[in-house]
Amino acid sequence: MSTTFDTPTPPGANSARMGLLTRNRWLVAGGLAITGLGLAAGLAWPRTVVSEPAGKEAAKETAKGPVQKWAKVSVELPASQVSFPPGNGSVIANAYCLICHSAGMVLRQPALTQDEWTGEINKMRNSFGAPLPPDQVEALAKYLQSINGRDSAGKQVSVDGQGS
């Protein structure tokens, strides 16, 4: 023989549960509404400039879809007023480093060993397209270490003693 016992429900338990369900429904509905507005706004987002191709290529290009035309941007940076300190390699640094960097920016870097400077220079060449010829990397690294470097033991070897 089995007996079941009804556990009394505390007052307000069902209303609390219903309140939670109602709140969750409103949260879901609100989230869906916001998502819908976001999607609608995304569909109306302005597109890039579309240009019409000319000539025989026009049929081929428009068959694939609109042609995207990108504007060419030209930026002229101010010339640096400060050059690198004189020394073996300063001509290389002034010719190639000042294209993108100021001398002050380079001189404020942490003091590096010659091998570390070589790694930084090769990163500039390989990742960022610095036009430094490969045969000048070692001379530039040696120069940068002489003006803002340290030896392998960690001792500062910079010219002015200030390093970075």
Image (cartoon, helix red, strand yellow):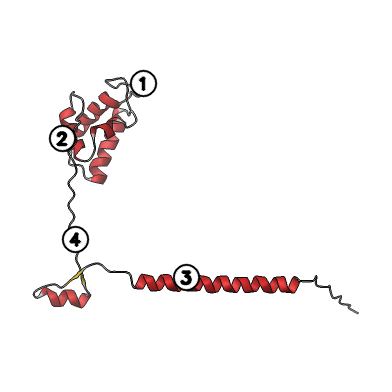
- 41 or 163, nearer to the observer: 41
Label 4 packing within 10 angstroms: few (<14), some (14-19), many (20+): few
The image shows residue 33 at horizontal and vertical percentages of 48, 73
Q: What element carries label 1?
A: loop
| Label 3: which secondary element | helix
Q: Which of marks 1 and 4 is nearer the N terminus?
A: 4
Q: Which of marks 4 and 3 is nearer the N terminus?
A: 3
Q: Could you tell me which residue is drawn at 13 percent across and 72 percent down?
A: 53
Q: How far apart, in angstroms, are the residues tagged by discs 3 and 2?
A: 54 Å
Earlier sequence position, callout 3 versus callout 1:
3
| Residue at mark 4 to residue at mark 3: CA–CA distance | 34 Å
Q: Whole-percent x and y of residue 134?
A: 18, 37
Relative height, residue 9 to residue 140 (above, below): below
Count residues near mark 2 (Cα–Cα under 10 Å), then give few for <14, some for 14-19, many for 20+.
Answer: few
Give the residue type that dot 4 points to.
Answer: Ala
Residue visible at 20% across and 62% down? 70
Q: In which quarter of the image is residue 27?
A: bottom right
Say which element carries label 2.
Answer: helix
**Residue plotted at (42% across, 70% down):** 38
Location of residue 145 with respect to 74 vertically, above or below: above
Of callouts 3 and 2, the N-terminal one: 3
Q: Mark 4 points at which residue?
A: 71
Q: In the image, what residue type sits under mark 1?
A: Lys
Q: Do the residues labelled 4 and 2 touch (CB within 8 Å)?
A: no
Give the residue pinned by disc 2: 95
Locate residue 159: give its quadrant: top left
Badge 3 amino acid: Ile
For residue 66, side relative to residue 27 (left or right):
left
Disc on res. 34: 3
Q: Position of residue 105 (x, y in %)?
A: 28, 34
Seen in the picture, residue 8 relative to 126 is either above or below; the reply is below
Q: Position of residue 153 (x, y in %)?
A: 37, 22
